[in-house]
Image (spheres, coloured by chain):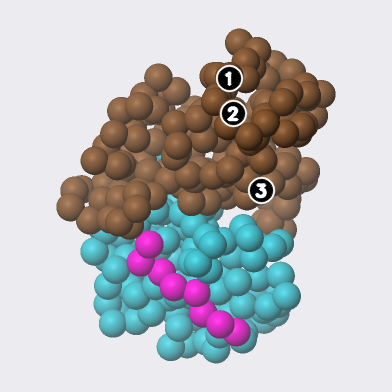
Amino acid sequence: MEESRKPVADNEYLYRRSYLPERKFMNPDGTATSRVFKLRPKDEGRLSVNVKSMITAEKAVKDPSKFFLFEISNISVRAVGLNTYHDPVDGEGGPNPSHAVIVGMTPDDDVIPGLLARKSRRVQV
Amino acid sequence: MAVSINSYTTHSSAPVSKPSLCIYKPYTEGKNFDDSGIIVKSGIATPFALNTRIMDLLTEYAALQDNWDQDNALAPTSEIIKHARYLTELLERRGQSIYHAAPGPSGEIMLDLRDKTKTKSVEIILYPDRAVAVFFSDMEKPKQQEFKVGKIAEILQWLNK
């Protein structure tokens, strides 16, 4: 199915949003933990992200009082053997053409979430 | 002079140079953490000098409810919290500080250990049905293996060598 989707260009950056009730749920230096990039069963192997060039940080984070935003380069994602595809969706807030999915991880894999976290950085919104 | 702590804890005898009265509450396997307090003469200000923040975080994580991340994340079970506290105390006893502890979407707790030069780290991840150790290094390819408490010495040797 993914083959029919358009790959995200290597030079793009991706936003990953995470709900964190408290700042202390992040690493002490404000970076993401590996849990932010961990697949959950409902993801069905597809980690949701937004393509940075297609959405503002403010829109991507939705509610900055509840969510934190991290960004990672797509070339870093590709470097660990994953692929990113455009996956526009119609969400609660209307159409979201910036939505994309990272594929190639498995639910039992704990190496790749750690690598992605270490290559990401927090976006101040 | 030595302070003898009961043999059910991970703490062993500790020398006391300047005895003073304090309340010492060691974690005891199979018992409620808050009910295991004993009073000893000790100069130790806190039993978790290295990992006080981690123990506090685990207490907060113990209160999480399902859907705590508003995206259907499972709350860590009391069993997972117990194991995480046990590991924290074990690492404290070995002089290893824990960089961070974080809950995950499948009810897991992740303990992140880092070396002093920040070139290596180990994540010990306690899931409801398994436990894994993940090794990250600037010099080696990352790897993941099943975690067992008996491997702690080996893990710390790799981290700190």
Rendered colour, chain A: cyan
Where in the figure is residue B117, as x and y percent of width and height?
A: 30, 56
Drawn side of residue B101 relative to residue A23, left or right: left
Picture coordinates of residue B121 (x, y %)?
A: 35, 48
Chain under disc 1: B
Q: Which residue is mark 1?
A: B1
Which chain has been coloured brown in this picture?
Answer: B
Span colored in magenta: A118-125
In reply to whether residue A120 is colored magenta, the answer given is: yes
Q: Is residue B23 left or right of residue A34?
A: right
Whether the magenta-drawn stretch holds residue B4 is answered as no
Q: Give the mark nearest the N terminus, 3 or 1.
A: 1
Residue under circle 3? B57
Above or below: residue B157 compared with residue A39: above
Could you tell me the amino acid type at mark 1?
A: Met
Badge 2: residue crowd in 10 Å (few <14, some 14–19, many ≥20)? some
Q: Secondary structure at mark 2?
A: loop
